[in-house]
């Protein structure tokens, strides 16, 4: 029966993959921190396009990421600016939970991609393969039988 608790709520488990931020969400949060008082969606999109060398960034991506981050409590609406002849600008800020999640995600990806340890992958020397045959394999193709025409 569902009791309202998720796996992430259990104390014996660490952060699950659902708790981690994705690379796009990390970039959005870093830009919100960098932009400060100008952290509204349109400016975030412009900054993303500059950062990604003019690669197309779609409104749905940015607004969807902002919506998901605010639902998770990682960013919050800081203020709403009224600008004439345009919709109001919603300025966002990163919450303290968001800062903790951002630091955890950055540490996770740094550990994942900056590994210095290597693993010694040597084959098992004492074991013989079960697929080795005791006799040599015959040549490929049809077998020559007695009395067969050539």
Image (tube, rainbow, N blue to C red):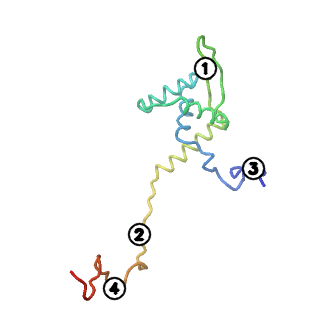
Counting residues from the N terminus, which is met first, the one under dot 3 or under dot 1?
Answer: 3
Alpha-carbon span between mark 2 and mark 3: 44 Å
Front-most of 22 and 142? 142
Q: Nearer the viewer, mark 4 or mark 3?
A: 4
- Residue extending farthest bottom: 146
Dot 2 alpha-carbon crowd within 10 angstroms: few under 14, some 14 to 19, many 20 or more = few
Nearer the observer: mark 2 or 1; the answer is 1
Residue plotted at (54% across, 33% down) = 61
Residue 110 vs 122, above or below: the answer is above
Sooner in the amino-acid sequence: mark 2 or mark 1: 1
Q: Position of residue 72 (x, y in %)?
A: 67, 38
Task: State the image coordinates of residue 64 (x, y, percent, origin top left).
Answer: 59, 33
Crowdedness of circle 3 by 10 Å Cα count: few (<14), some, many (20+)? Answer: few
Identify the residue position indicated by label 4 in the image. Answer: 135
Label 2 and label 1: CA atoms lie apart by 59 Å
Residue 21 marker: none
* Contact, mark 2 vs mark 4 (Cβ under 8 Å): no
Residue at (65% x, 21% y) in the render: 79
Please tell me whether mark 2 or mark 3 is closer to you in this view. Answer: 3
Question: Which of these two is toward me, 90 or 95?
Answer: 90
Task: Find disc 1 in the rendering and name its residue.
Answer: 89
Q: Position of residue 42 (x, y in %)?
A: 54, 24
What is the number of the mark on residue 122?
2
Q: CA distance from mark 1 to mark 4?
A: 79 Å
């Amino acid at each position: 029966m569902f009791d309202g608790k998720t796996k992430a709520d259990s104390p014996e488990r660490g952060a699950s993959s659902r708790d981690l931020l994705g690379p796009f969400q990390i970039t959005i949060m870093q830009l919100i921190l960098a932009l400060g008082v100008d952290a509204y969606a349109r400016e975030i999109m412009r900054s993303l396009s500059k950062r990604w060398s003019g690669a197309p960034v779609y409104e749905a991506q940015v607004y969807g990421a902002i919506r998901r981050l605010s639902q998770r409590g990682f960013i919050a609406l800081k203020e709403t600016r009224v600008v004439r002849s345009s919709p109001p600008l919603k300025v966002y800020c990163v919450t303290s939970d968001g800062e903790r999640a951002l630091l955890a995600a950055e540490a996770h990806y740094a550990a994942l991609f900056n590994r210095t340890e290597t693993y010694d992958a040597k084959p098992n020397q004492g074991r013989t393969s079960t697929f080795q045959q005791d006799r040599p394999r015959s040549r490929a193709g049809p077998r020559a039988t007695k009395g067969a025409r050539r």
